[in-house]
Image (spheres, rainbow, N blue to C red):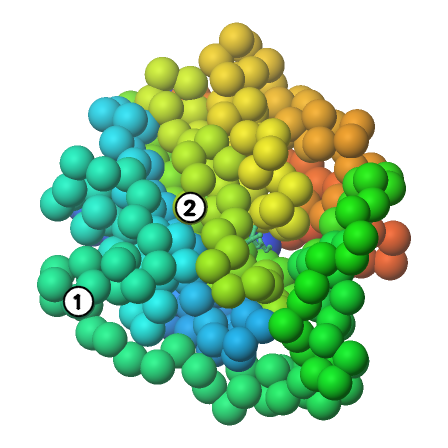
Amino acid sequence: QADLPLVINTWHFKNAARVAWSTLQKGGSLLDAVERGCAQCELEQCDGSVGFGGSPDEHGETTLDAMIMNGDTMEVGAVGDLRRVKNAVGVARAVMEYTEHTLLVGESATIFAQNMGFMSEDLSTNKSIAIFSKWLQQDCQPNYRKNVSPNPSQSCGPYKPKAKSWGPKHPKGNFDPSSHDTIGMVVIGKNGQVAAATSTNGATHKIPGRVGDSPVAGAGAYADSTAGGAAATGDGDIMMRFLPSFLAVDLMRNGTQPTTACEIAISRIKKYYPKFFGAVICANTTGGYGAACNKLPGFSQFHFMVVNPPTNQSQLHT
Ligand code: SD4
């Protein structure tokens, strides 16, 4: 194929795209490419939203979600709420390659990672501690709770349910798009094979234990070498209800063009959550690619990176 191989990833994470591309050029596998591309963002703490030191939860801890998917075999490895291990996408790959499971979570995922040789270290940084302290001191809004009253003497919780009210549901989500840039990457090989991966530190001030869309197959990403690959970014609590990555891939399977497939995946969500913040990228097995987003008013455009022949250079698209 003239336009293959192809690397596509969410946002302006240029180094991630470059690392994935050079992994392919050096003869690495598609899985190596998506893993190393996402790991690059974990190292760089891309936009503070990937890797250690970002998105502290209600207790101030950074936890990580990641997944990897092999579109040839339909194997998936993923971790959610991973604690004290920086290389979440590496642990996700270890789940795929060394277990029969798909998703490991929380402290148990950390123990698995340690047993597999991953280093255990504090994921806090001065920046994440500052974000957390500011939240405690200033507003301490329970961003991701609804129908609760804070303890009057302690506005940061514990939170108690208010008398049950069945009011309208959470119409827009409480997601703060300014701090959100998960990496989702799809790589298509020379013969149209597909791999995908994601890595994120989730949502700032989330309730401890929260796992987003990024480690969920079909939500955060999906890869199927008979159709294509897709990855999502944005308000995972909303997006994971619609499996947008699976939908985009399945539409491409039926001949839908990539951009249209992404647009349909976004509009499915928009129907119920018109103000949700999110985007989907996707690519088919012949090297066609596209993206679509739904953005909050005032938020700058969604960017994504693409590398493919003939330029072999990462290019920023909006
Ligand atoms: C999450 N989807 O955990 C992730 C966050 C994200 O761009 O994508 N930010 O909800």
Q: Judging from the image, what secondary structure is the residue with disc 1 in?
A: helix
Task: Say whether residue 49 is left or right of residue 229.
Answer: right
Identity of the amino acid at label 1? Gln
> Residue 174 location, x and y as percent?
74, 56
Extreme residue toward the top, this view:
254
Q: Position of residue 318 (x, y in %)?
A: 69, 47
What is the x, y in percent for residue 204? 61, 67
Quarter holding the N terminus is top left
Residue at 78% across / 31% down in the picture? 272
The residue depicted at 52 percent of the width and 44 percent of the height is 213
10 Å crowding of disc 2: few (<14), some (14-19), many (20+): many
Residue placed under numbered mark 2 in the picture:
215
Dot label at residue 70: none
CB at mark 2 closer than 8 A to ligand 1? no
Q: How many marks?
A: 2
Q: 11 above or below 194?
A: below
Q: Does the rendering let one see residue 31?
A: no
Q: Which mark is residue 114?
A: 1
- Whether 36 is drawn above or below 246: the answer is below
Q: Residue at x 12, y 45 (%)?
A: 98
Q: Residue at x 58, y 72 (%)?
A: 58
Q: CA distance from mark 2 to mark 1?
A: 19 Å
Where residue 28 appears, x then y in whole percent? 20, 46
